[in-house]
Image (cartoon, helix red, strand yellow):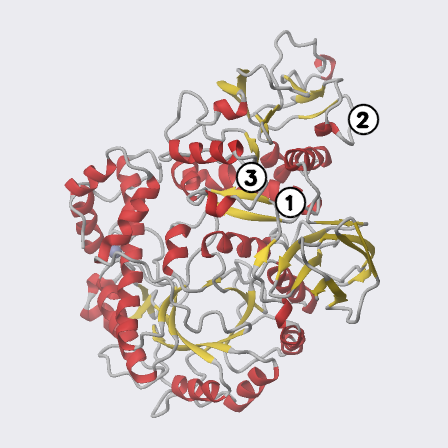
Amino acid sequence: MANSRRTFLKQAAGVTAAHFFNVAQGATGQAAPVIGNPGWYDRPMRWAQLAFVEDDPGNYDLAFWLDYFQKIHADAACLSAGGSVAFYPTEIPRHYRSKWLGNMDAFGDILHGCRKLGMNVVARTDAHAAHQDIYDAHPDWIAVDEKGNKRRHPSDPDFWITCALGPYNFDFMTRVHEEVMTKYTPDGIFTNRWAGSGMCYCEHCRQNFLAFSGLNLPRTHDPQDPARRQYLVWHEQRLFALWRLWNEKIRAINPNASYLANAGGGALSDLDMKTIGELAPTLFADRQARSGLTVPWANGKNGKEYRATLGRKAIAGIFSVGLEEKYRWKDSVQSGDEIRLWVADGIAQDLRPWFVKFNAKPIDRRWLPVVEEIYQWHYANQNYLRNERSFARVAMVYSQQSASYYGGDDARAKVEDPALGFYQALVEARIPFEMVHDQLLDPEHIDRFKTLILPNIAALSTRQCEQIRAFVGSGGSVVATYETSLYDEWGVRRKDFGLASLFGASFSGEQGPMLNSYLSLQRQSHPLLTGFEDATRIINGVHCVKVTVVDSGTTSPLLVVPPYPDLPMEEVFTTPPTTHQPGVVVREVGHGRVVYFPGDIDRTFWDVLDVDHGKLLRNAVLWATNEPAPVTVEGKGVLDVSVWGQKSSMTVHLVNLTNPMMMKGPVREVIPLANQQVSIQVPEGRRVARVRLLVAGGDAHYRREHGAVHLTVPSIGVHEVVAVDFG
Ligand SMILES: [Zn+2]
């Protein structure tokens, strides 16, 4: 399956990164991805995961868990089978059995119990660690660090870290998966930590990479280094080959089952989400809770990123009931309200809940009634949670190729932070929005949106730029920032923006980081400056590109005030600039509108959270979108808003993020929001039969006016769902 260097070079000549991803799919000779398998995957609405620890067999209360699963209406379970520790009587040599297993079959017993409850069951394996006897028999299966040392497990010295890309996964774990499938025919196999633990320099990785690229494994993270660039392609190709191999072997035994990878994410994840969207019949976002400064809407963001490439396939959000900090308190239980808020934001963005608990002998039981309450509400309202479409008209693009080839080691700061800043601005503005993958900018995926946001989507191919221009040509609008389209798909700088003609501006130089720079508001009134009537200037971003306006149809209601001394205080003044650098370039193109910010306003907003930047980004999206919003919500507080259609209803989710610690994760108490004025556009041809509040319970008073439903939501605790039933 190794690609020859000649093949690689042939591929490299003038093809896009996206094309590489597609070529990689052919790795095992399987042309068509596993799609169109309706199977069982859309059935489960609520998942339960019990991850055994080694001493669980014989020491935990099976009846208690089966009773709990039934009580919370969990309709699928993920249960530990094997890999680093086997919880069933395996016959594979050196497949380590739990020392507590004896003659028991812990995995089989709980699997059969769950089946009797009518649950789907997925077997969990773990591929990242192996015992000493594996090391002794197959030293080449162990991961090797940059200095050539085999890697001992950092937290448990009884284990070694395995190489994900060599025979441990391709041979040994394949046999484990075949044995589990043959003995138990579960509905799928879900593998924890299957994709490796960072760079591996073992003999297999060295040889396979050499055969693929003609090069030695890179020792730099610079994406412009030829070996590093080819490594990114090879590494991904190898993992997708493994995914396909396991999937084939599993389906050869049970055609209704699949390999279910623990994979995926946003711009910073290293496996192409478009390919994952084609391969995976369902996918689970493994972002278990906040850590440090994680904001509570981060869980919902997973839902948007996954949906961008999985479409209507079921997606679930894995949440833990404990703290997810770097200090690894795996037996902890966090506050009930924090669990409620994290899960509610996932549900509001279409993630089905999946709780995970390690250790089947719970020490601290405070989470049990919290999950029970969430799941019972979810069960009672599940018809309103089977979403068929989002009504959002705004979408934000995310770009893994920008992160890989333009961002490199700085991808978090250069690629993710601008997205987070724009995300925060949209949440504060209560604008419902979706996310779009940059490899899916075709009409089928983006025509349902009016406005595309490009938050420093720096690396775009010529084709992607054409797709964005075509979107505007057919009436769409674009809001873009900073270096969007200034690089090609490999992160190579262009002479000018790929989207220069769309922006109405050409690149003429970089500046930054800038201290003490501003944007002066021009006197002509423009909707972009709504809410700034009493202002003359606001702060600028920190990084900025200089641009030359090339289209006479543009306007620039903001001009850059270049940096001037910030010390000594006597020198903190400036004279009017002689050149006029636009701080924003605004133009109308047919029915579409384009707003381009040369500065990193979105990234700076994430960094500084200046209220003016939030307002400016909101105004830009509202002006570009230029149509009645699908839902508006007025009132005090911070709300994450989403709007969905089901078979014969529509829902508006309102998740209350109002919290003195909103920009930090911890929740101390829920601060209810009073009297939110909600207006919902009803799709044409639909008759409203009634309006209900799914959390408060009962019917809501509403009035109909101009095709919309208007109501007041008197109080929101963590979460409210306005459900509009159609007659
Ligand atoms: Zn290796």
Q: Nearer the viewer, residue 356 or 3?
A: 3
**Where on the image, by quarter, is ligand 1?**
bottom left
Image coordinates of residue 671 in percent, x first then y, are: 79, 59
Q: Callout 1: few (<14), some (14-19), or many (20+) C-alpha neighbours within 10 Å?
A: many
Element at badge 1? helix
Residue sitting farthest toward the front? 685
Callout in the foreground (3, 2): 3
Snapshot quadrant of residue 711: bottom right
Q: Please state which of residues 651 and 28 is positioned toward the viewer in this rendering.
A: 651
The amino acid sitting under disc 2 is Glu
Comparing 284 with 410, the one in front is 284
Q: Residues within 10 Å of mark 3 (few under 14, many from 20)?
A: many
Kindly identify which numbered label has been placed on residue 533. 2
Is the C terminus in the top left, top right, bottom left or bottom right quadrant?
bottom right
User: Which residue has dot 3 on it?
Assistant: 452
Q: Position of residue 619 (x, y in %)?
A: 69, 34
Quarter of the image that includes the N terminus: bottom left
Which residue occupies 44% across, 64% down? 282
User: In the displayed image of the protein, which residue is found farthest to the top?
Assistant: 578
Q: Amino acid at mark 3?
A: Leu
Could you tell me how far apart the alpha carbons at marks 3 and 2 are, in whole angstroms?
A: 27 Å
Could you tell which of marks 2 and 1 lies nearer the N-terminus? 1
Residue at the disc numbered 1:
424
> Marks 2 and 1: which is nearer the front?
2
**Type of amino acid at the residue the image marks with label 1:** Gln
- Residue 514, horizontal then vertical, whole percent: 59, 23
Residue occupying image coordinates x 52% and y 43%: 447
Circle 3 SS class: strand
